[in-house]
Protein backbone atom coordinates (compact mmCIF):
# COMPACT_ATOMS: atom_id res chain seq x y z
CA UNK A 1 0.00 0.00 0.00
CA UNK A 2 1.16 3.52 -0.76
CA UNK A 3 1.86 5.65 2.31
CA UNK A 4 0.59 9.20 1.65
CA UNK A 5 2.98 10.56 4.29
CA UNK A 6 6.05 9.14 2.62
CA UNK A 7 8.89 11.46 1.66
CA UNK A 8 12.36 10.18 0.72
CA UNK A 9 15.16 10.34 3.27
CA UNK A 10 18.93 10.33 2.84
CA UNK A 11 18.92 6.89 4.41
CA UNK A 12 16.63 5.59 1.66
CA UNK A 13 19.11 6.78 -0.97
CA UNK A 14 22.16 5.02 0.47
CA UNK A 15 20.45 1.89 1.81
CA UNK A 16 21.70 -1.50 0.68
CA UNK A 17 21.28 -5.16 1.63
CA UNK A 18 17.97 -6.05 3.26
CA UNK A 19 16.97 -2.39 3.68
CA UNK A 20 17.33 -1.86 -0.03
CA UNK A 21 15.46 -5.05 -0.89
CA UNK A 22 12.58 -3.91 1.33
CA UNK A 23 12.54 -0.43 -0.26
CA UNK A 24 12.44 -1.85 -3.78
CA UNK A 25 9.78 -4.40 -2.87
CA UNK A 26 7.57 -1.64 -1.45
CA UNK A 27 8.07 0.40 -4.63
CA UNK A 28 7.29 -2.59 -6.85
CA UNK A 29 4.17 -3.35 -4.80
CA UNK A 30 2.93 0.24 -5.13
CA UNK A 31 3.65 0.19 -8.89
CA UNK A 32 1.78 -3.08 -9.41
CA UNK A 33 -1.07 -1.84 -7.23
CA UNK A 34 -1.50 1.19 -9.47
CA UNK A 35 -0.52 -0.13 -12.91
CA UNK A 36 -0.80 -3.91 -12.62
CA UNK A 37 1.77 -5.73 -14.69
CA UNK A 38 1.58 -3.26 -17.54
CA UNK A 39 4.36 -0.90 -18.55
CA UNK A 40 4.01 1.91 -21.06
CA UNK A 41 6.02 1.38 -24.24
CA UNK A 42 7.26 4.28 -26.31
CA UNK A 43 9.74 4.75 -29.12
CA UNK A 44 12.33 7.51 -29.19
CA UNK A 45 13.97 9.12 -32.18
CA UNK A 46 16.93 11.43 -31.70
CA UNK A 47 16.70 14.03 -34.43
CA UNK A 48 19.57 16.47 -33.83
CA UNK A 49 22.70 16.59 -31.70
CA UNK A 50 23.28 20.31 -32.20
CA UNK A 51 22.91 22.08 -28.88
CA UNK A 52 23.30 25.70 -27.84
CA UNK A 53 23.64 24.75 -24.17
CA UNK A 54 26.84 23.70 -22.44
CA UNK A 55 25.94 21.27 -19.62
CA UNK A 56 29.15 20.02 -18.01
CA UNK A 57 27.83 16.45 -17.85
CA UNK A 58 26.79 16.08 -21.50
CA UNK A 59 28.80 15.09 -24.55
CA UNK A 60 26.58 17.18 -26.82
CA UNK A 61 27.51 20.45 -25.06
CA UNK A 62 28.29 23.27 -27.47
CA UNK A 63 31.97 23.40 -26.49
CA UNK A 64 32.53 19.82 -27.61
CA UNK A 65 34.10 20.66 -30.96
CA UNK A 66 35.17 17.04 -31.47
CA UNK A 67 31.59 15.87 -31.98
CA UNK A 68 30.25 15.35 -35.48
CA UNK A 69 26.89 17.14 -35.53
CA UNK A 70 23.81 15.97 -37.43
CA UNK A 71 20.20 16.81 -38.10
CA UNK A 72 18.04 13.94 -39.31
CA UNK A 73 15.87 14.20 -42.41
CA UNK A 74 12.24 14.14 -41.37
CA UNK A 75 11.16 11.98 -44.34
CA UNK A 76 13.37 9.09 -43.22
CA UNK A 77 12.01 9.26 -39.68
CA UNK A 78 8.41 9.62 -40.82
CA UNK A 79 8.75 6.54 -43.03
CA UNK A 80 10.26 4.63 -40.13
CA UNK A 81 7.68 5.65 -37.54
CA UNK A 82 4.63 5.40 -39.77
CA UNK A 83 5.46 2.12 -41.54
CA UNK A 84 7.94 0.24 -39.37
CA UNK A 85 7.03 1.01 -35.77
CA UNK A 86 6.78 -2.07 -33.51
CA UNK A 87 3.18 -3.01 -32.68
CA UNK A 88 3.72 -2.61 -28.96
CA UNK A 89 4.61 1.09 -29.25
CA UNK A 90 1.80 3.48 -28.29
CA UNK A 91 3.79 6.73 -28.08
CA UNK A 92 6.68 8.41 -29.81
CA UNK A 93 9.18 10.70 -28.13
CA UNK A 94 11.07 13.12 -30.36
CA UNK A 95 14.29 14.24 -28.76
CA UNK A 96 17.11 16.62 -29.68
CA UNK A 97 19.71 18.93 -28.25
CA UNK A 98 18.49 22.49 -27.81
CA UNK A 99 18.31 23.25 -31.51
CA UNK A 100 15.46 25.51 -32.71
CA UNK A 101 16.48 24.93 -36.35
CA UNK A 102 15.80 21.21 -35.95
CA UNK A 103 12.45 22.01 -34.35
CA UNK A 104 11.42 23.97 -37.45
CA UNK A 105 12.96 21.73 -40.09
CA UNK A 106 12.56 18.24 -38.62
CA UNK A 107 10.34 18.06 -35.55
CA UNK A 108 7.30 20.06 -36.66
CA UNK A 109 6.88 18.30 -40.04
CA UNK A 110 7.48 14.94 -38.35
CA UNK A 111 4.77 15.58 -35.76
CA UNK A 112 2.36 16.72 -38.46
CA UNK A 113 3.03 13.53 -40.45
CA UNK A 114 2.60 11.33 -37.37
CA UNK A 115 -0.62 13.10 -36.44
CA UNK A 116 -1.99 12.58 -39.97
CA UNK A 117 -0.98 8.95 -40.30
CA UNK A 118 -0.91 7.37 -36.84
CA UNK A 119 -2.70 7.35 -33.49
CA UNK A 120 0.54 7.51 -31.50
CA UNK A 121 0.75 9.83 -28.54
CA UNK A 122 3.54 12.34 -29.13
CA UNK A 123 6.02 13.69 -26.61
CA UNK A 124 8.94 16.00 -27.22
CA UNK A 125 12.18 16.64 -25.36
CA UNK A 126 13.72 19.67 -27.04
CA UNK A 127 14.99 21.97 -24.31
CA UNK A 128 14.03 25.53 -23.49
CA UNK A 129 12.39 27.22 -26.46
CA UNK A 130 10.36 30.38 -26.99
CA UNK A 131 6.61 30.41 -26.42
CA UNK A 132 5.80 30.57 -30.14
CA UNK A 133 7.68 27.33 -30.76
CA UNK A 134 5.97 25.62 -27.82
CA UNK A 135 2.62 26.71 -29.27
CA UNK A 136 3.56 25.46 -32.73
CA UNK A 137 4.54 22.05 -31.31
CA UNK A 138 1.26 21.85 -29.43
CA UNK A 139 -0.76 22.89 -32.48
CA UNK A 140 1.02 20.22 -34.54
CA UNK A 141 -0.15 17.54 -32.11
CA UNK A 142 2.42 16.97 -29.35
CA UNK A 143 0.90 16.82 -25.86
CA UNK A 144 3.74 15.78 -23.56
CA UNK A 145 6.81 17.96 -22.95
CA UNK A 146 9.79 16.42 -21.22
CA UNK A 147 11.84 19.10 -19.49
CA UNK A 148 14.23 17.89 -16.83
CA UNK A 149 15.15 20.26 -14.04
CA UNK A 150 18.42 18.30 -13.75
CA UNK A 151 19.42 19.51 -10.25
CA UNK A 152 17.14 20.62 -7.44
CA UNK A 153 19.31 23.42 -6.06
CA UNK A 154 20.52 26.57 -7.75
CA UNK A 155 24.21 26.49 -6.71
CA UNK A 156 24.73 23.03 -8.19
CA UNK A 157 22.60 23.90 -11.23
CA UNK A 158 25.00 26.75 -11.95
CA UNK A 159 28.11 24.78 -11.04
CA UNK A 160 27.33 22.05 -13.58
CA UNK A 161 26.23 24.60 -16.22
CA UNK A 162 22.77 23.08 -16.61
CA UNK A 163 20.63 24.75 -19.33
CA UNK A 164 20.05 28.51 -19.00
CA UNK A 165 19.36 29.47 -15.41
CA UNK A 166 17.65 27.52 -12.64
CA UNK A 167 14.80 30.05 -12.39
CA UNK A 168 14.29 30.12 -16.14
CA UNK A 169 14.09 26.34 -16.28
CA UNK A 170 11.47 26.17 -13.54
CA UNK A 171 9.50 29.03 -15.10
CA UNK A 172 9.44 27.13 -18.39
CA UNK A 173 8.22 23.94 -16.72
CA UNK A 174 5.44 25.85 -14.96
CA UNK A 175 4.49 27.78 -18.10
CA UNK A 176 4.29 24.60 -20.17
CA UNK A 177 1.97 23.01 -17.62
CA UNK A 178 -0.14 26.18 -17.43
CA UNK A 179 -0.47 26.12 -21.23
CA UNK A 180 -1.96 22.63 -21.14
CA UNK A 181 1.08 20.44 -21.74
CA UNK A 182 1.49 17.28 -19.69
CA UNK A 183 5.00 17.82 -18.41
CA UNK A 184 7.44 15.15 -17.35
CA UNK A 185 10.70 16.13 -15.71
CA UNK A 186 13.81 14.50 -14.31
CA UNK A 187 17.00 14.87 -12.34
CA UNK A 188 20.53 13.51 -12.23
CA UNK A 189 21.98 11.43 -9.41
CA UNK A 190 25.64 11.15 -8.51
CA UNK A 191 27.28 14.21 -10.07
CA UNK A 192 30.73 14.84 -8.56
CA UNK A 193 30.41 15.99 -4.95
CA UNK A 194 26.61 15.86 -5.07
CA UNK A 195 25.55 14.03 -1.94
CA UNK A 196 22.23 12.49 -0.78
CA UNK A 197 21.65 15.55 1.42
CA UNK A 198 21.59 17.76 -1.69
CA UNK A 199 19.55 15.18 -3.56
CA UNK A 200 16.72 15.83 -1.12
CA UNK A 201 16.29 19.21 -2.85
CA UNK A 202 15.58 17.35 -6.10
CA UNK A 203 12.82 15.32 -4.45
CA UNK A 204 11.32 18.45 -2.86
CA UNK A 205 11.35 20.27 -6.18
CA UNK A 206 9.91 17.32 -8.12
CA UNK A 207 7.13 17.09 -5.56
CA UNK A 208 6.24 20.79 -5.93
CA UNK A 209 6.30 21.09 -9.71
CA UNK A 210 3.18 20.60 -11.87
CA UNK A 211 4.53 17.45 -13.51
CA UNK A 212 3.11 14.01 -14.31
CA UNK A 213 6.26 11.95 -14.33
CA UNK A 214 9.93 12.10 -13.49
CA UNK A 215 13.09 10.30 -14.54
CA UNK A 216 16.21 9.57 -12.54
CA UNK A 217 19.38 9.73 -14.64
CA UNK A 218 22.59 8.18 -13.35
CA UNK A 219 25.71 10.30 -13.77
CA UNK A 220 28.02 8.61 -16.27
CA UNK A 221 31.21 10.59 -17.01
CA UNK A 222 31.32 11.48 -20.71
CA UNK A 223 34.68 11.30 -22.50
CA UNK A 224 34.53 14.74 -24.11
CA UNK A 225 33.23 16.65 -21.09
CA UNK A 226 34.87 18.52 -18.20
CA UNK A 227 33.72 15.69 -15.90
CA UNK A 228 35.44 12.92 -17.86
CA UNK A 229 37.74 11.89 -15.03
CA UNK A 230 35.18 11.65 -12.25
CA UNK A 231 33.74 8.31 -11.12
CA UNK A 232 30.22 7.27 -12.18
CA UNK A 233 27.34 7.26 -9.73
CA UNK A 234 26.91 4.45 -7.25
CA UNK A 235 24.30 2.34 -9.10
CA UNK A 236 22.36 1.74 -5.89
CA UNK A 237 21.74 5.45 -5.36
CA UNK A 238 20.03 5.65 -8.75
CA UNK A 239 17.82 2.64 -8.16
CA UNK A 240 17.00 3.72 -4.61
CA UNK A 241 16.05 7.18 -5.92
CA UNK A 242 13.66 5.58 -8.41
CA UNK A 243 12.07 3.50 -5.67
CA UNK A 244 11.79 6.56 -3.42
CA UNK A 245 10.19 8.56 -6.23
CA UNK A 246 7.63 5.80 -6.77
CA UNK A 247 6.72 5.75 -3.09
CA UNK A 248 6.46 9.54 -3.06
CA UNK A 249 4.21 9.67 -6.14
CA UNK A 250 2.44 6.36 -6.89
CA UNK A 251 0.59 7.78 -9.94
CA UNK A 252 3.63 9.07 -11.77
CA UNK A 253 5.17 7.61 -14.87
CA UNK A 254 8.78 6.73 -14.08
CA UNK A 255 10.96 5.52 -16.94
CA UNK A 256 13.61 2.83 -16.85
CA UNK A 257 16.45 4.70 -18.59
CA UNK A 258 18.88 2.83 -20.81
CA UNK A 259 21.87 4.22 -18.89
CA UNK A 260 20.90 1.98 -15.97
CA UNK A 261 22.64 -0.77 -17.93
CA UNK A 262 25.82 1.34 -17.97
CA UNK A 263 25.87 1.53 -14.18
CA UNK A 264 25.62 -2.22 -13.70
CA UNK A 265 24.73 -5.39 -15.56
CA UNK A 266 20.97 -5.85 -15.40
CA UNK A 267 20.52 -2.28 -14.13
CA UNK A 268 17.59 -1.80 -16.50
CA UNK A 269 15.77 -4.84 -15.18
CA UNK A 270 16.49 -3.79 -11.62
CA UNK A 271 14.89 -0.43 -12.49
CA UNK A 272 11.73 -2.28 -13.53
CA UNK A 273 11.81 -3.91 -10.09
CA UNK A 274 12.26 -0.58 -8.33
CA UNK A 275 9.23 1.36 -9.50
CA UNK A 276 9.74 2.05 -13.22
CA UNK A 277 6.66 1.71 -15.45
CA UNK A 278 7.83 3.07 -18.80
CA UNK A 279 10.23 1.51 -21.29
CA UNK A 280 11.64 3.15 -24.40
CA UNK A 281 12.74 1.52 -27.65
CA UNK A 282 15.39 3.49 -29.48
CA UNK A 283 14.43 3.68 -33.16
CA UNK A 284 17.00 6.31 -34.16
CA UNK A 285 18.71 5.10 -37.35
CA UNK A 286 22.03 3.49 -36.43
CA UNK A 287 24.19 5.90 -38.44
CA UNK A 288 22.78 8.87 -36.49
CA UNK A 289 22.61 7.56 -32.94
CA UNK A 290 26.38 6.96 -32.81
CA UNK A 291 26.79 10.74 -32.48
CA UNK A 292 23.97 11.24 -29.97
CA UNK A 293 26.13 11.02 -26.87
CA UNK A 294 24.38 12.33 -23.80
CA UNK A 295 26.57 10.03 -21.72
CA UNK A 296 29.52 8.41 -23.40
CA UNK A 297 30.01 7.07 -26.89
CA UNK A 298 29.55 3.47 -25.77
CA UNK A 299 25.81 3.66 -25.16
CA UNK A 300 23.59 0.76 -24.20
CA UNK A 301 20.94 0.97 -26.89
CA UNK A 302 17.57 -0.44 -25.86
CA UNK A 303 16.35 -1.97 -29.09
CA UNK A 304 12.87 -3.45 -29.51
CA UNK A 305 14.27 -6.91 -28.80
CA UNK A 306 16.09 -5.87 -25.62
CA UNK A 307 13.10 -3.95 -24.27
CA UNK A 308 10.67 -6.81 -24.89
CA UNK A 309 13.11 -9.31 -23.38
CA UNK A 310 13.55 -7.18 -20.27
CA UNK A 311 9.84 -6.72 -19.59
CA UNK A 312 9.06 -10.38 -20.30
CA UNK A 313 11.87 -11.47 -17.97
CA UNK A 314 10.30 -9.37 -15.21
CA UNK A 315 6.84 -10.88 -15.82
CA UNK A 316 5.50 -7.59 -17.22
CA UNK A 317 3.51 -6.82 -20.36
CA UNK A 318 3.22 -3.85 -22.75
CA UNK A 319 0.38 -1.52 -21.79
CA UNK A 320 -2.52 -1.30 -24.20
CA UNK A 321 -3.23 2.20 -22.97
CA UNK A 322 -0.92 4.86 -24.36
CA UNK A 323 1.06 7.27 -22.26
CA UNK A 324 -0.61 10.36 -23.72
CA UNK A 325 -4.01 8.82 -22.98
CA UNK A 326 -3.01 8.08 -19.41
CA UNK A 327 -1.79 11.62 -18.89
CA UNK A 328 -4.94 13.05 -20.40
CA UNK A 329 -6.91 11.40 -17.59
CA UNK A 330 -5.15 13.82 -15.29
CA UNK A 331 -4.57 11.67 -12.22
CA UNK A 332 -0.79 11.69 -12.55
CA UNK A 333 -0.64 15.47 -12.82
CA UNK A 334 -2.68 16.18 -9.70
CA UNK A 335 -0.78 17.97 -6.97
CA UNK A 336 0.22 15.75 -4.03
CA UNK A 337 -2.36 15.26 -1.32
CA UNK A 338 -0.23 14.69 1.70
CA UNK A 339 3.38 13.91 0.80
CA UNK A 340 5.55 16.17 2.96
CA UNK A 341 9.28 16.66 3.17
CA UNK A 342 10.60 15.30 6.45
S1 LIG B 1 21.98 17.90 -21.55
FE1 LIG B 1 20.62 18.62 -23.19
S2 LIG B 1 20.74 20.87 -23.05
FE2 LIG B 1 22.51 20.08 -21.92
S3 LIG B 1 24.20 20.06 -23.43
FE3 LIG B 1 23.23 18.03 -23.47
S4 LIG B 1 21.71 18.10 -25.09
FE4 LIG B 1 22.27 20.21 -24.57
Image (cartoon, grey):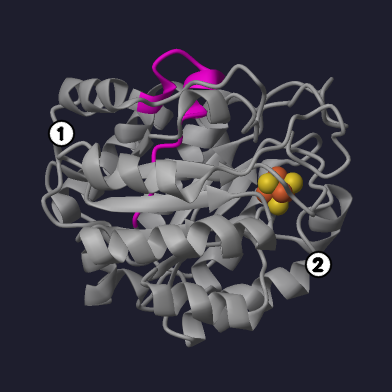
Label 1 sits on a secondary structure element that is loop
Quadrant showing the N terminus: bottom left
Magenta part of the protein: which range?
A: 253-268
104 on left or right of 67: left
Q: Most prominent secondary structure in the magenta stretch? A: loop
Q: Residue at the location (46% across, 52% down)?
A: 94
Relative to 204, say whether 44 is above or below. Answer: above
74 on left or right of 41: right
> Which tag, 2 or 1, sits closer to the chain's start?
2
Relative to 171, say whether 235 is above or below. Answer: above
Q: Nearer the viewer, residue 7 or 275?
A: 275
Read off the residue under disc 2: 165
Read off the residue under disc 1: 316
Question: How many other residues sit within 10 Å of disc 2, few (<14), some (14-19) or many (≥20)?
Answer: few
Label 2 sits on a secondary structure element that is loop
Q: Within 8 Å: ligand 1 and the Cβ of disc 1?
A: no
Kindly indicate the quadrant of the structure image that contains residue 115.
bottom left
Amino acid sequence: MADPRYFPTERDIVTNGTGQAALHERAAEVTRGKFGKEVFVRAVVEVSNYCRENCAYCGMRRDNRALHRFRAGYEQLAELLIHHCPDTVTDVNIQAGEDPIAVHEVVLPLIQALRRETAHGISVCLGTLDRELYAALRAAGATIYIMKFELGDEPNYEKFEAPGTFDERLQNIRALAADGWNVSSGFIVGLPGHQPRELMASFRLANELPICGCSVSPFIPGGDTPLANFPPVNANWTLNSMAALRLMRPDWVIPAVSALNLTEKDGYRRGLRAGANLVTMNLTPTNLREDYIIYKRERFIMTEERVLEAIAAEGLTPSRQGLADYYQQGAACAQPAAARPA
